[in-house]
């Protein structure tokens, strides 16, 4: 990415270019929708909407006889009034599995829900603007999401992971060659993720000037460009200092001079590269858990909640706009805390609890 813009602005510029390309594959009237939601959505969200809506209009062309001869550019906003709830329910069923360009596309509950939510937003916009008279999408039921167990590393696994980064663990010979060159960087990067809970996108967007050792903080840009300071502890500080000593000796590629974390090509490290190195090291610790940068974020949130019991602090540090999101993720820990609390309040100082009688069924 060229230009002298900060990283998060460069990402928005690239996303804006991508969205303009995608809009060329959608009905012309849909541009109004994307202009309307621009102030309240992130650029990546709008791109996801564009992909989702393209699937919808391609479905109509392929499966709905009344639109078969239109072509995607032939759709007008009035056509939304010709679509019934039954058509949308058929679309919801279609999303579970469809074939496109000789490729199978499978959407599970979350994928179907996201695509239908995009369609609901699309309909709601034109209905509020009174461009259409009906809103069948408002009557469409979204699939029930079965919550998955939150995957995180246990404290001993965190220690093992960082030890593996330092030592190389059980890496292959080829991996060991790259490890020797990058282990200081990798240790700083993983320690930072585990010690602050920042998102991988926030991590790769860090510049050298965003690190403030005087106040033990890093300046990051949250979704939407909001600038905040996240504070770090001694372990993160030590790892960052070691890496920055090495970083001073590296001549960064053009456009990446300010980047904190650099790739093997001396360019700003990418999200994909961080995902790959997390996968590489985590596999030396556990093969039963699929550890991603987001799982490291969950690990930090869990540790912070266990130590403080303050769900609002956890939500603030993680950058959740809605504390209910945080509660949902860490609700399972509340039962552990309640169990811990049960014997902490003594009503009588000298109270003696007799041993529980053994149930006769125990010997059966």
Image: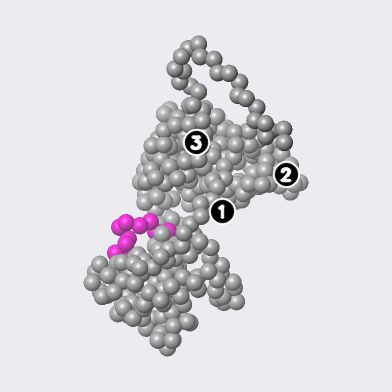
Residue topped by disc 1:
272
Point 54% across, 51% down: residue? 148
- Quadrant of the snapshot with the C terminus: top right
> Between tags 1 and 3, which lies in front?
3
Mark 2 and mark 1 lie on one chain; the one further toward the N terminus is 2
**Mark 2 → mark 1, Cα distance in angstroms:** 19 Å
- The residue most toward the bottom is 69
Q: Residue 304: give x, y in percent of width and height.
A: 48, 33
Compare residues 55 and 148 and report the one nearer the observer.
Answer: 148
Compare residues 91 and 335 and report the one nearer the observer.
Answer: 335
- The residue most toward the left is 130
Mark 2 and mark 3 lie on one chain; the one further toward the N terminus is 2
Q: Does the magenta stretch include residue 36?
A: yes
Q: Is the magenta stretch mostly helix, strand or loop?
A: helix
**Mark 1 → mark 3, Cα distance in angstroms:** 36 Å
Point 46% across, 75% down: residue? 90
Residue topped by disc 3:
335
> Between tags 2 and 3, which lies in front?
3
Q: Residue 69: give x, y in percent of width and height.
A: 42, 88
The 10 Å Cα crowd at callout 1, few under 14, some 14 to 19, many 20 or more, is: few
**Mark 2 → mark 3, Cα distance in angstroms:** 38 Å
The colour style of the image is one colour
The 10 Å Cα crowd at callout 2, few under 14, some 14 to 19, many 20 or more, is: some
Q: Residue 174: give x, y in percent of width and height.
A: 74, 48
Q: Splitting the image into 4 quarters, where does residue 152 fall?
A: top right
Q: Splitting the image into 4 quarters, where does residue 25 fall?
A: bottom left
Residue topped by disc 2:
171
Range shown magenta:
35-44
The 10 Å Cα crowd at callout 3, few under 14, some 14 to 19, many 20 or more, is: few
- The residue most toward the top is 350
């Amino acid at each position: 990415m060229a230009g002298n813009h900060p990283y998060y602005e460069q990402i928005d510029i690239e996303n804006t270019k991508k969205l303009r390309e995608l809009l060329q594959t959608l009905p012309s009237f849909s541009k109004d929708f994307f202009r309307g939601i621009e102030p309240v959505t992130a650029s990546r969200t709008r791109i996801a909407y564009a992909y989702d809506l393209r699937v919808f209009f391609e479905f109509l062309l392929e499966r709905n006889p009344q639109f078969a001869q239109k072509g995607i550019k032939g759709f007008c906003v009035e056509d939304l009034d010709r679509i019934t709830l039954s058509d949308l329910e058929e679309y919801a069923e279609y999303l579970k599995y469809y074939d496109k360009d000789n490729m199978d596309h499978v959407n599970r509950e979350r994928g179907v829900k996201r695509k239908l939510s995009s369609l609901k937003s699309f309909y709601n916009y034109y209905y509020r603007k009174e461009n259409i008279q009906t809103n069948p999408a408002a009557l469409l039921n979204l699939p029930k999401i079965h919550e998955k167990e939150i995957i995180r590393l246990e404290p001993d696994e965190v220690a093992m992971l960082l030890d593996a980064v330092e030592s190389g663990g059980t890496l292959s010979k080829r991996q060991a060659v790259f490890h020797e060159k990058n282990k200081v960087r990798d240790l700083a990067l993983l320690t930072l993720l585990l010690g602050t809970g920042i998102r991988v996108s926030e991590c790769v967007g860090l510049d050298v000037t965003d690190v403030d050792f005087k106040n033990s903080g890093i300046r990051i840009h949250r979704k939407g460009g909001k600038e905040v300071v996240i504070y770090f502890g001694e372990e993160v500080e030590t790892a960052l200092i070691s890496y920055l000593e090495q970083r001073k000796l590296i001549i960064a590629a053009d456009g990446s001079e300010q980047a904190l974390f650099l790739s093997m090509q001396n360019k700003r490290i990418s999200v994909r590269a961080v995902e790959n190195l997390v996968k590489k090291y985590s596999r030396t610790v556990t093969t039963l858990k699929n550890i991603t940068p987001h799982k490291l974020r969950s690990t930090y949130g869990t540790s912070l909640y266990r130590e403080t019991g303050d769900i609002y602090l956890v939500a603030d540090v993680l950058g959740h706009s809605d504390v209910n999101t945080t509660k949902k993720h860490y609700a399972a820990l509340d039962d552990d805390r309640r169990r811990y609390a049960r014997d902490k309040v003594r009503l009588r100082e000298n109270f003696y609890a007799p041993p529980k009688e053994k149930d006769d069924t125990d010997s059966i």
